Image: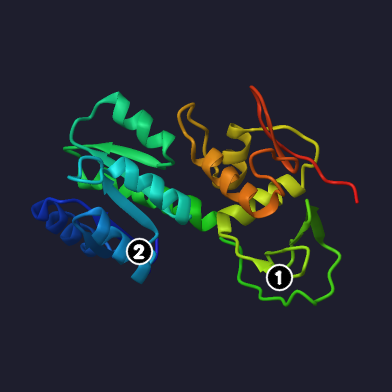
Amino acid sequence: MTDSSSVLVVDDDPTIREMLKEYLESNQYQVYEADSGAAMRERLDAHVPNVVLLDVGLPGEDGLSLARYVREHYDIGIIMVSGAGETIDRIVGLEVGADDYLAKPFDPRELRARLKSVIRRYQRAQPPVTPSPASSPTENRVGFGSCLLDLDSYQLFSASGEEIPLTAMEFELLKIFAERPNRPLTRDQILSLTQNRDWDPYDRSIDIRIARLRRKIEADPDRPQVIKTIRGVGYMFTPVDK
């Protein structure tokens, strides 16, 4: 836990936001607030936090829809908060890519423990920043379809040599596939290798990230040939012979 760890609290109740802000700031977190989906998007455009603490029961666009948006656009932690405390909320939250779930009322100390755990997972996945131009010579490159992954510079290049932006988690996914070609990997194995945690049967965070990667590397994302789905198992990287 460092002083730079930040949390975006998305809740329409100003009393709850104020309470969480006071408690988290007293524990060295930088706290941002949003009372709606529109306000959340504005905050994310201005600053990407380590974790979004997202209330399920927001008026208008609810927390589950917003969690799906966050997962599709950012590789950051998502903790869902629900006043109902029903199992269905936890299941649906995991299905849209949330990392953890808390039911109200909760002990702030439990929230702090869960925040630490989620932040730690994502910090493990962050590669060191080592800028390297596409022209730099390296032996440590792996082809993903027509794309090329440079394991030394943490970059993905198109067939024309243009860099394709990758998040830290997307790089980690490609890296574990590159190290295990033609080997089916379960979702549990993938989560353990990338985030050091077990897979929940309702957790779709891996599926969402795979879908996002396919849009970057597959010629036809709807008929993937590079990262294939193995029914009943998980996913497998199949190098394309050139």
Choose between 77 and 69: the one closer to the eye.
69
What's the colour scheme? rainbow
Q: How many marks?
A: 2
Quadrant holding the N terminus? bottom left
Q: Residue 13: give x, y in percent of width and height.
A: 12, 50
- Please state if 242 lies on the left or on the right of 21 as rendered: right
What amino acid type is highlighted by mark number 2? Leu
Which residue is pictured at 28% across the width and 59% down the height?
A: 40
- Can I make out residue 114 in this image? no
**Residue occupying image coordinates x 77% and y 35%:** 183
* Between discs 2 and 1, the one toward the N terminus: 2
Amino acid found under the numbered disc labelled 1: Glu
Is 2 left or right of 170, judged from the image as shown? left
Q: Label 2: state its secondary structure.
A: helix
**Which class describes the residues within 10 Å of circle 1: few (<14), some (14-19), or many (20+)?**
few
Residue shown at the point (55%, 40%) measured from the top left:
206
The residue pinned by badge 1 equals 162
The spot of residue 158 in percent (x, y) is 73, 63
Tell me the number on the disc at residue 44.
2
Q: In screen coordinates, is 35 left or right of 65?
A: left
Mark 2 to mark 1 CA distance (whole Å): 27 Å
Coordinates of residue 232 in the picture (x, y in percent): 64, 22
**Whole-percent x, y for residue 33 in the image:** 22, 61
| Above or below 151: residue 192 | above
